[in-house]
Amino acid sequence: MRIIWLAGLSMSALLAAPNDTLFGIALSQNKGASVLGVPLQIVVLLSALTLLPAVIVSITPFLRITLVLHFLRQALGTQTAPSNQVLIGLALFLSLIIVRPVAEQMYKSGWEPLEQGKVSRQEAWDQGTRPLKSFLLRFAREKDIALMVETTKTPPPKSPEDLDLGILIPAYVLSELKAGFQIGAVLFLPFLVIDLVVASVTLSVGMVQLPPVMISAPFKILLFVLVDGWNLVVGSLLKTFY
């Protein structure tokens, strides 16, 4: 959150500056244009790249997807298979599929008009963040939003669209954490039943020295493969965002 707030302060300084300068640095290549100069565009791009990991983790479906995949691996009892790299890569590409329309709307409504000089930086910021706010509002619970509004002592907005990103982002993270844990608990149940059945059978026949996990793991993997578990899990996850 500290990185996000620092980025917000930097963006506020950029938006509050005159149309052609920022801290004495020219923002445009000529006096008649309102676009950013090439050197400043490079600085903005590099700054955005440093914030990219925090943005992906906090304001995309990456959080929920990684939680669910982690719980699934724990329920299967396969320890490190699939590896963390595979799960993170899968979660990253699924997140890109979901947020791609939102990113395109933000680019068309915010950055393109700013490059063409049709709007000011403040108007470009307001128009560009509108699709992001709509996306966050779809999944942020009202209870979590109210908690953030109360914590920050922010005056209640007239409409949900008037909420600031500083309130919507932590509320969205809290909501995604709850949703991910709920889905993970549901995924655990069928595999827990298999563990209980195998443990009771091994104890009844006197196989005390053999860990029940070693016997139940092949059955859980076999069940998961037979029902085409990866397709079901990924398909259900994607449907929760549409």
Image (spheres, rainbow, N blue to C red):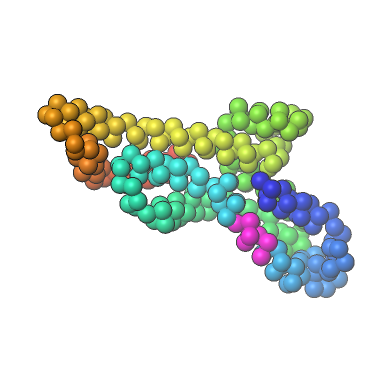
Residue at the (69%, 41%) spot, across then down:
166
Which residue is more in the foreground, 3 or 234? Answer: 3
Q: Is residue 190 left or right of residue 169?
A: left
Whether 133 is among the magenta residues is: no
Residue 67 coordinates in the image, percent (x, y): 45, 42
Question: Horizontal and vertical percent for residue 42?
Answer: 69, 69
Q: Residue at x 46, y 37 (%)?
A: 180
Q: Quadrant of residue 212?
A: top left
The question of residue 47 being in magenta is answered with yes
Whether residue 156 is situated above or below residue 35 in the rendered picture: above
Q: Residue at x 35, y 41 (%)?
A: 74
- The residue lying at 63 percent from left, 60 percent from top is 50
Asked whether 186 or 194 is in front, the reply is 194
- Left or right of 111 in this view: 192: left
Eyeballing the image, is 108 above or below 200?
Answer: below
x, y percentage for residue 19?
84, 61
